[in-house]
Amino acid sequence: MILKPVLDDFKIVGFYLSKVILALGAAMGIPLILSFLLGEYNPCLDFAAGIAVSFIAGLSLKVICKTDKDLLWMHGMIVVSLSWVVAMFLSAIPLFMSGHWISFLDACFDSMSGFATTGLALVQDLDHLSYGHNLWRHLIMFIGGQGIVIVALSFFVKGFSGAFKMYVGEARDEKILPNVIHSSRFIWMVSIVFLVLGTVSLGIAGLAAGMRPFNAFFHGACNFMTAFDTGGFAPQSQSILYYHSLAYETITVVIMILGAINFKLHYHVWTGSKIELAKNIESRTFFAAVIITFFITALGLAEAGIYPKAAVLFRKGFYQLISGHTGTGFQTVYAQQFFSDWNDLAIVGVLIAMALGGAACSTTGAIKMIRIGIISKAFIQDVKRILLPERAVIIQKFHHIKDVFLDDKLVRPALIITLAYILFYFAGAIAGMLYGYPFLKSLFESTSAAANVGLSCGITVPSMPAGLKVVYIVQMWAGRLEFMSVLTLLGFAVAVVRGKK
Amino acid sequence: MIVDPKILFFVVILLVFSQQARAGSVSSEDLLKRSAEFDGKAIVYSGEIIGDIMRRKGSVLVNVYDGRNALGVYLPLSAAGVISAAGDYKTAGDIVEITGEFRRVCAEHGGDTDIHASGVKLISRGSIKKRSIDGAKKILVFKLLGALVIIWILSRLKIR
């Protein structure tokens, strides 16, 4: 029997949601300041409107729902899933007001794409967008990569017992440190240190490429934020191809890989346990997956004969592959060329990499390496069970920070989530085909949205059907949160309608 | 409404000349979608220089935007003196007509798709855009800030 939610349930959700909304409003102050300093006065007004609406909504909700009750698991999950939807609408306000998005739906699409660190974009005339709006696009990706709710909590809440429930809701089921707030602050510390290093490195690469100093470092900061958070927005419409620079590509590859590594692994490497990197199941699986998927892509590209030199084939193939595997979405080939110049085999290689994703507790989306590692180990265990004598005791272990014995309790959820992702990829592909797109293109774009990658084969354009935009928004949202908190929200909605008192 | 015949004549002449100017020019969409067909061929491509004018060893790299896509164009140093403004939020970049070779996979530049220009013609000089403050936005923001102050006062009263 489903119980109907009581008033207190709504108040708890509303109260914590208000904190997230207020934090988001405060974050809009950063691009507002930049716009003001650069004399971009209309963008200043766009952000002032966004801040005012956020503060009005946040303050109203805070007063109406004021409570001192703590969160239950259900509340935590609902706060998370609702926060992402509310954040999408609020962040879209300054974007839409800029006039670079033809509809509010398009602005919402880019806003969700940013928060979910996807990178698919419907912005028009990006090359003439203001610095303030461009910073906001990249900042929402940085915030989304860390987890919107956790960002709000780590800065605005001193500590409370419900934090872990929201931390898990944002698809981070591993605590780095015993306290969740400390864990999220560690994630911030790592991100800020890399932000400084990454911005300087990319800034220098930009200067060497001939860019103006301000642009070089502005682009450096923006590209770092979206590379480390495996998002994929770029300040110019050509993505990384704008720079025509090997150094730029090399640095972004390093940053993308750093972003795809589990923050728990970062912690162990930072605290001196470098051997963990070589022993960990996630890094080993990632290494193997990159080799296999690159082999497929390279075979396809060699067969297509588009790149006559091996070095060029490696540069183009490996960049798109790593971009897809880490879920970033930076491109050094034009979207139109993916399907006109690359053959199906090469595209399938990148498609598999996108579907697999990076590490758990990182900023990537998709199935993730830990699940692939566990399923592979379970597969090996079952093969051994068939081959070895019936009385043999088969023990399978893997190393993830510590040695872990493989049992069905670990394999089952890994298989369920993997299956859910695969179904989700195909559901989006069917939606694409219903709108008349061919199968492989539809599957590619759907996987890119649901796995929060952002590589595009050309379907994602402002003129695409509105229904498909909504499908991709839902895919980006549910894919980033790994379904559970979204399903809890749907369950809550059902309980409101059909629950018993 | 009666249209001045002089204005009508001017508009017709302008349309005819702009069509002629476009006739030899190929769009970025055609270049990218039919890249194999245009690979290694001499083309004419027009658009606005956007972003940065990047000086490199022996050439200048600019990205030229034709309203659909931007393509990288390598200009010889001698031709680079013609251009001066790159477009962004505050600036309308130079509009140029590039004559050169389209390279689907440029062996010289790591396999990138680009154009190696042999000539560049300045169609119109770039300029600083004049942007006045949007009155409707200003009024909206004042109204929202007013509402926010009221909500804030009410929230303080309610909390007490």
Image (cartoon, coloured by chain):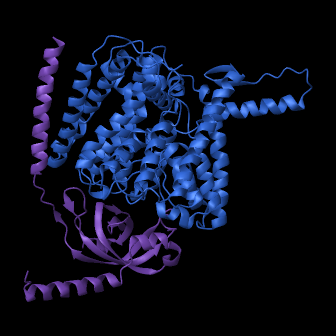
Q: Does residue B34 appear left or right of residue A385 in this picture?
A: left
Which chain is depicted purple?
B
Quarter holding the N terminus of chain A?
top right
Q: Position of residue A196 (x, y in %)?
A: 36, 35
Position of residue B96 relative to residue A127, above or below, is below
Which residue appears at 63% of the width and 66% of the height?
Answer: A304
Q: Does residue A311 appear left or right of residue A462 in this picture?
A: right
Position of residue B56 relative to residue A498, above or below, is below
Q: Position of residue A7 (x, y in %)?
A: 35, 17
Residue A39 visible here? no
Total number of numbered labels? 0
The hue in which chain A appears in the rendered picture of the protein: blue
Which residue appears at 91% of the width and 24% of the height?
Answer: A390
Front-lying residue, A469 or A370 = A469
Q: Does residue A250 appear left or right of residue B130 in this picture?
A: right
Q: Position of residue A278 (x, y in %)?
A: 63, 31
